[in-house]
Amino acid sequence: MNRNAQQLPEQATTLRDAALLFSFDQDTSMNAHNLDKIFRPRSVAVIGASSRIGSVGNTVLRNLVDGQFSGDVYPVNPKYKFVEDFQCFGSVKELTNAIDLAVVCTPAPTVCSVVRECGEAGILGLVIITAGFRETGEAGRRMESDLAVVAKSFPGMRVIGPNCLGILSPHQHLNASFAADMPPAGNVAFISQSGALCTAMLDWAITENVGFSQFVSVGNAMDITMANLIEYFADDGHTDAIILYIESLTDARNFMSAARDFTKTKPILAYKSGRFEQSAQAAASHTGAMAGVDAVYEAAFARAGIVRVFKIEDLFDGAEYLARKPQTRGERLAIVTNAGGPGVMATDALLTHGGQLAALSPETTETLNVQLPATWSHCNPVDVIGDATPERFAFAINAVLRDPNVDALLVILSPQSMTEPSGVAEAVFEASEYSSKPILASWMGGRRVAEGVELLTAGGIPTYSTPEKCVRVFMHLVQHEQNRETLLETPHEVLLDFPMDCEARKRIVASSTTSLIESSYLSEDESKSILEAYGIATTHTEVARSKQAAVEIADRLGYPIVAKVHSRQITHKTDVHGVELNLQNAKEVAAAYDAIIQRAEQQRPDAEIEGITVQPMLAKPLARELIVGAKRDPVFGPVILAGAGGITAELYHDRALQLPPLNKRLARRMLQSLKIYPLLSGFRGRRGVDVDAVVDVLLRVATLVLECPQIAELDINPLLVHERGAIAVDARIVVG
């Protein structure tokens, strides 16, 4: 670190000119976002620097010094002449040299003017640590809005924060944060919306000697978002993986694009908090209830190739695994252990998470028979027995790693009285030197295994306290490889025949929705008309506004008949006992009309009951009931749903979500992920139903919601699927 900055070139007559001169030799691919000014600065100004120990301004300045930042540092504060042996400047305007990065630590009401001064001085990289903005309420929200306007008035200015911990770039020896310590330099970038989690992760990383390439607290993300950072770190030669802590997203389109590009070659692990949003309870349809906020995030992560974890400890464990740079090339896991119980625990965890226990080749089994005691397990997990020496462990480990049926190895050690944890750790490390297959270790215990754990960690072997942790982390990386294969597939173009052209379809939707005044619900017959315009078969439905009309329609359509309450306000007809099935004659239809109207008026006195709908009763004994729907999520836009249908749709929650546009491969995988899929494809001698017809309906629904943004929610429930087609028996569309 230079305490006395070099003078500017003579031709740079202003700070803005100097900033332009310095920018030309930066990497142009990264300059698109000007993030080099933040993560690779040559000079840093700490605005609000202080001599008061414990203050944010003092901590940031000391962290830059203690982190051994090699560039120039400039404290700015009108209260001081010197801070920590640095000359202190009274304001940004007094700075005489070019500044790449400014770290702002001044009180919230002063930040707007500080940012304006930075822009006028040509400072394009800012980290605003100061809190007191939108997280504090309406006044803070207005102040942050004003701040954003000021920042955007200076072309090329990029801002992290406000209300953030700051950033750490270990390879640059840059600690521009108020975190206590610098983690080792590594290959994993950590991006978090929680500053508290950042400090916990840092403390753990230093204890476990886990390195990071970048460490970013985004705070309120007024300007630079997670999407920007993912895109930038994709070109960072030090970053081989990213770990995210997410509370919410606002730039979903950019986030999805950046994440998909990154995960085609490198893994992203993410933890999403706030899984149970109350807004899901206010959903207007079955789809709205089933496609809650968290479910949509999960579908989006899967579409973007992101591996989602559900425990904070999995973020820590995942960071350790990724930092060791193991390459996961398959899901066939072998286990070597000196205790049968932990081996069974690991097997249970592997199968629970959808992994595969490697089947040892006959040659490997014979090799192990030669050297291991006769009482060894003779299968995977390979139990080398409790009295195993380091040499016995080493023999088994090397034999298993040579097996072509094995993709990865988990070594488990239980500290029995004759066990040498350190010697076995050395054997594991030596084996790793001669094999490219991933090796994980679980040294179970405390004091007796501590030295062995240290040896494994120092040797770059991911080591965990329990076998279950090892398996979870391993399966996260297996999932990444599976996601990556999906992302790299080239889908075939989907060609659908529609009854009418695109403009005609849109006119049908517009004519049904523009007449709405108070209600946002389309009636069943209106909803079915829209589905038919998109080529989705529906049961013929007619509206009867009197008992006599109901009987006349039924006589004309033919028996048996289904009668349903007709009301825009009643979303779920069965909730008010508004459905009568299998009506055989005019007398039953007349009685059903009176009963349906009476029950609906009693249970929903607020609803306008317009009569009933009448439609033929379908007799398809081998058919299956599904639900197909769509919801317009406020963050990610349209989401398509498929699942077990009928009145139990919300009870069983057997559903799959996907973000359009869809192709046949994605639509079919949605169905294959359902628990009821064996019943659709054929089970125990019973013939399956027409899965291709369901795929076709999903593609048409996806087209519908993409073409018609006024549709907020859509339900086809049930979609009756039989051996030669699928038909929408009931439908409801909600207009937004």
Image: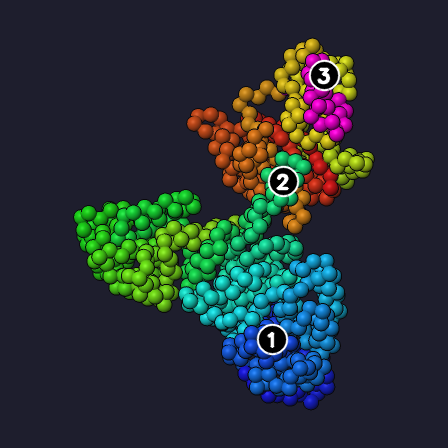
Separation of residues labelled 3 and 1 (CA atoms): 76 Å
Amino acid type indicated by mark 2: Gln
Q: Residues within 10 Å of mark 3 (few under 14, many from 20)?
A: some
What residue is disc 3 on? 594
- Give the residue at x 55% y 27%: 624
Identify the image quadrant of the N terminus. Answer: bottom right
Q: In the image, 254: left or right of 465?
A: right
> x and y percent of residue 726 in the render?
60, 29
Amino acid type indicated by mark 3: Asp
- Give the residue at x 58% y 78%: 52
What label does residue 281 carry, if any? 2
> x and y percent of residue 177 in the render?
57, 71
Q: Nearer the viewer, mark 2 or mark 1?
A: 1
- Upstream in the sequence, badge 2 or badge 1? 1
Q: In this rendering, is residue 727 above or below 664? A: above
State whether residue 409 appears in this view: no
Q: Secondary structure at mark 2?
A: helix
Q: Secondary structure at mark 3?
A: helix
- Give the residue at x 53% y 61%: 197
